[in-house]
Image: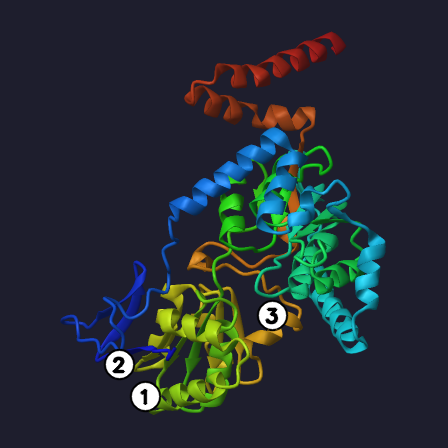
């Protein structure tokens, strides 16, 4: 299959709005040259497919697991992942010894890389820890804010087209830094062994996981959210998965907390004439190989760069093991856009609110303040997005589908709860009572006002008795 990128060469300003690129000039709309048979160049904020059939299947699984517990989990696992799950000898729980064996089975180079990456991720996330905040005023009021870890968290590690030990690190380490006392890891059983992928189990051992289940899909989300005879329910879910996992997380949200509903990965590269087209092509393919629905866009102020990028993509695709996946992604969600200026390019970035932004420009640091809607920004030619995926230390669990407009990447705060405390003395209550009662009465909540006045009356009586 030959991939075909979308192209945009504007004669005015380019904006991304309402899920598609809308081209506007000061006076009138201008023409768009599109090299694909679609109504719009690139729908960056992709509308999630309703996928009624998938939603119905997920609802059925959730209902079944809540009603029949372990029996339903076995049935769905046998049907969807591992036929041996209904065998009486099959155990969902993965023992620490099996995780350790998986770790020992890794070559030393991969062990070293995982150890080094985990140290960097932990260091960055430890910098996010919050301290207690306390203030007081002249009337004697003391107000404070304390942070408490969520008690029990379930983490989903995918096991579909590829296994991602890095996802284990990125999801578990922030929870550990936050102080979560019970962390449960689930990952689908592999067809041959009935166990999660060895790399996932090895990463679990590295982080000291003691509770892990060979369990995937919507049935894993249901088991964690509602509990079964053998799997206690959790308070929050984290971790990416396929469509069925995402839909299941959407449906259980509210019964348990969730981190986010992840969509396909996406990168938006801003490039000027100084950019290396081979770097751009490599970085676009790094996203495209993730998933057939992954997005890869380059917006450049150098029109002559566009042809060089496409040529580099063709050359690099020819040796890519996951070529078919990458070609599909580029055909569906690949685009090269030309802009008049870096400012115009950054405006398109902000309107798209992408997961990843790369700044392949002469002075990337000067662009940072102009970007206010993105998951993570990678500055300069030697900071490609994969360094964030694996090693830099920032989290690779990021908002997708334009949700960077209101959401942030996964961090320690996602596994913490804020609690306020208030301490008033008698003199404090006397000083504030009139304002409090006035506000309560204005809202028609007389019992609120009485909760104040009854204390004032008692304090007055006690004072008179003392006198």
Q: Element at badge 3?
A: helix
Q: Is residue 59 above or below residue 293?
A: above
**Cβ–Cβ below 8 Å for labels 2 and 3?**
no
Q: Which residue is mark 1?
A: 303
Q: Closer to the N terminus: mark 2 or mark 3? A: 2
Vertical placement of 366 versus 264: above or below?
Answer: below
Question: Going by the image, does 34 lie left or right of 53?
Answer: left
Other residues around mark 1 within 10 Å, as few (<14) / some (14–19) / many (≥20): some
Would you place residue 156 above or below residue 281 in this image? above
Q: Which residue is mark 3?
A: 389
Above or below for 419 versus 367: above
Determine contact: label 1, label 3, CB under 8 Å.
no
* Inter-mark Cα distance, 2 to 3: 31 Å
Q: Is residue 459 left or right of residue 366?
A: right
Q: Position of residue 142 (x, y in %)?
A: 68, 37
Q: Earlier in the sequence, mark 1 or mark 3?
A: 1
Residue at (57, 49) in percent of width and height: 80
Number of numbered discs present?
3
Q: Which mark is residue 9?
A: 2
Dot 2 crowding, Cα within 10 Å, few <14, some 14–19, many 20+: some
What secondary structure is marked by label 2? loop
Expressed as whole percent of the image width and height from the top left, the position of residue 137 reads: 64, 39
Q: The N terminus is located in which quarter?
A: bottom left
Contact (Cβ within 8 Å) of mark 1 with mark 2: yes
Q: Residue 37 at what x, y percent from top left?
A: 24, 71
Residue at 33% x, 92% y: name it: 304
Q: CA distance from mark 1 to mark 2?
A: 8 Å
**Is residue 108 among the parts visible in the rendering?**
yes
């Amino acid at each position: 299959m030959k991939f075909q990128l979308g192209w945009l060469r504007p004669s005015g300003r380019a904006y991304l709005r309402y899920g598609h690129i809308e081209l506007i000039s000061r006076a009138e709309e201008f023409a768009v040259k599109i090299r694909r048979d679609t109504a719009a160049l690139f729908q960056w904020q992709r509308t999630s497919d309703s996928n009624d059939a998938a939603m119905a299947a997920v609802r059925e699984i959730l209902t079944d697991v809540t009603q029949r517990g372990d029996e339903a989990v076995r049935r769905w696992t046998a049907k969807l992942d591992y036929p041996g799950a209904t065998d009486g000898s099959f155990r969902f729980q993965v023992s620490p010894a099996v995780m350790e064996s998986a770790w020992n089975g890794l070559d030393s180079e991969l062990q070293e890389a995982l150890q080094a990456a985990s140290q960097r991720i932990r260091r960055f996330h430890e910098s996010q820890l919050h301290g207690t905040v306390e203030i007081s005023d002249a009337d004697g009021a003391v107000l404070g804010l304390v942070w408490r870890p969520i008690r029990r968290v379930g983490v989903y590690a995918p096991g579909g087209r590829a296994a991602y030990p890095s996802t284990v690190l990125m999801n578990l380490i922030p929870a550990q830094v936050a102080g979560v006392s019970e962390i449960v890891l689930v990952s689908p059983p592999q067809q041959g062994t009935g166990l999660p992928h060895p790399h996932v189990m090895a990463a679990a051992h590295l982080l000291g996981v003691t509770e892990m289940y060979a369990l995937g899909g919507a049935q894993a989300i249901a088991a964690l959210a509602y509990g079964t005879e053998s799997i206690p329910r959790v308070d929050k879910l984290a971790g990416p998965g396929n469509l069925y996992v995402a839909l299941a997380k959407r449906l259980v949200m509210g019964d348990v907390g969730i981190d986010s509903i992840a969509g396909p990965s996406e990168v938006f590269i801003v490039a000027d004439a100084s950019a290396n087209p081979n770097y751009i092509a490599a970085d676009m393919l790094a996203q495209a190989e993730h998933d057939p629905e992954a997005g890869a866009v380059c917006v450049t102020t150098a029109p002559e760069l566009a042809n060089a990028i496409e040529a580099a993509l063709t050359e690099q695709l020819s040796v890519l093991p996951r070529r078919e996946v990458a070609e599909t992604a580029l055909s569906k969600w690949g685009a090269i856009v030309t802009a008049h200026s870096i400012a115009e390019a950054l405006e398109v970035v902000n309107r798209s609110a992408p997961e990843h932004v790369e700044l392949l420009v002469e002075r990337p640091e000067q662009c940072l303040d102009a970007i206010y809607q993105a998951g993570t920004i990678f500055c300069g030619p030697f900071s490609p997005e994969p360094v964030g995926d694996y090693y830099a230390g920032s989290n690779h669990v990021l908002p997708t589908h334009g949700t960077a407009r209101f959401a942030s990447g996964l961090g320690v705060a996602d596994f913490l709860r804020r609690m306020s405390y208030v301490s008033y003395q008698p003199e404090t209550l006397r000083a504030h009572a009139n304002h409090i009662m006035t506000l309560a009465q204005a809202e028609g909540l007389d019992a609120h006002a009485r909760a104040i006045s009854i204390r004032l009356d008692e304090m007055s009586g006690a004072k008179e008795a003392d006198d």
